[in-house]
Amino acid sequence: MSYLDTDRCRLYYEDSAEHDPSGFHKPAVLFVNGWAISCRYWRPLIEKLSQKYRCIVYDQSGTGRTVIRGYKPAFTIEGFASEAGRLIEYLGLDKTRNLHIVGHSMGGMVATELCLRYRDALLSASIVACGIFEETAFTSLGLFFLGGLIDVSMNFRNVFLVEPLRSMFIKRAATKEISRDYHDIIIEDFTQSDKEATNAVGKFSIDPEALRAYTRHVIQIPSPVLCCVGMADHTIPPEGTITLYERRLAETATPTKLAKFMDLGHLPMLEDTARFAGALEKHFEFAEQFYKKTP
């Protein structure tokens, strides 16, 4: 558990190699969080992966233990990528091709930006529950109403501290049962996140221009990409991730794979940690072999 001072924030991060020095010689995995949540929800997954991988998590500005008092960070995809990039460089992960990047939900947009900035260090990208949709009048209207819903949820988010709204909030995120500890973490993170940051992230996640740029950038990632989706996701329609996968598959020759979890929702890392970890490991191993064949 450490802090890194940057021009945006005092960034909280955890590096599994701090507790196990052998981790410095393992391939590294950087996990990029979703909307209004701290890095704590990755812990069960890290327990599964840290035998083989150096696992790095952090709290984005506006969430968890990262400090933004006294700073004026820009709450944009580029801004969030810059703070993560500072961590990548500080840990020396930009020096060799030894880095896997995993982005969940909104974090998929930030992870994609990182993949392009650090393409020479990148082994693979994994995008979890962060899709795109064909632009129609219907989807535009849906995004408009979702923007309004974000405003309402942020203004009245403390209602999710009490039942039955508390349980409804969790069931929307996780289709399968997750431990009570992570119920508490998810609710605590959402209700205590910085309001300005959380609003900004919610808005750029559904901004049409940002989504168009995201689509282009995913296609441009030069390393193998895994698109992961829980087909029972009630937070973000799973069809969007499948569309993203199909677009990349059609427009680039670089390997692209799809992992579908038919019975899981928006939080596969908590709903079925072992199965999700297995899909990531398989992808990481494939990417490492890919670069051995094509350095």
Image: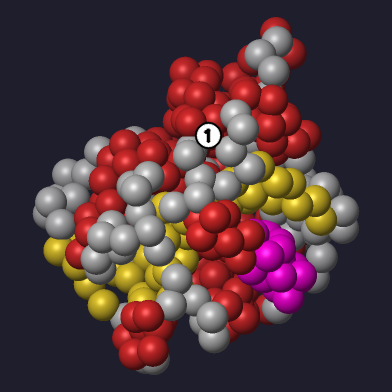
Q: Which residue is mark 1?
A: 218
Q: Quadrant of residue 283?
A: bottom right
Question: Mark 1 falls on what kind of element?
Answer: helix
Q: How far from the left and from the top, in percent, is residue 131?
A: 64, 36
Give the magenta range: 267-283
**Drawn side of residue 200 relative to residue 11, left or right:** right
Q: Nearer the viewer, residue 174 or 105?
A: 105
Q: Nearer the viewer, residue 75 or 126?
A: 126
Q: Amino acid at mark 1?
A: Val
The residue at 76%/70% (across/down) is: 275
Is residue 277 in the magenta section? Answer: yes
Q: How far from the left and from the top, in percent, is residue 115?
A: 42, 45
The residue at 42%/69% (across/down) is: 28
**Drawn side of residue 90 relative to residue 157, left or right:** left
The residue at 25%/68% (across/down) is: 91
Tell me if residue 161 can be seen.
Answer: no
Q: How far from the left and from the top, in percent, is residue 250?
A: 69, 25
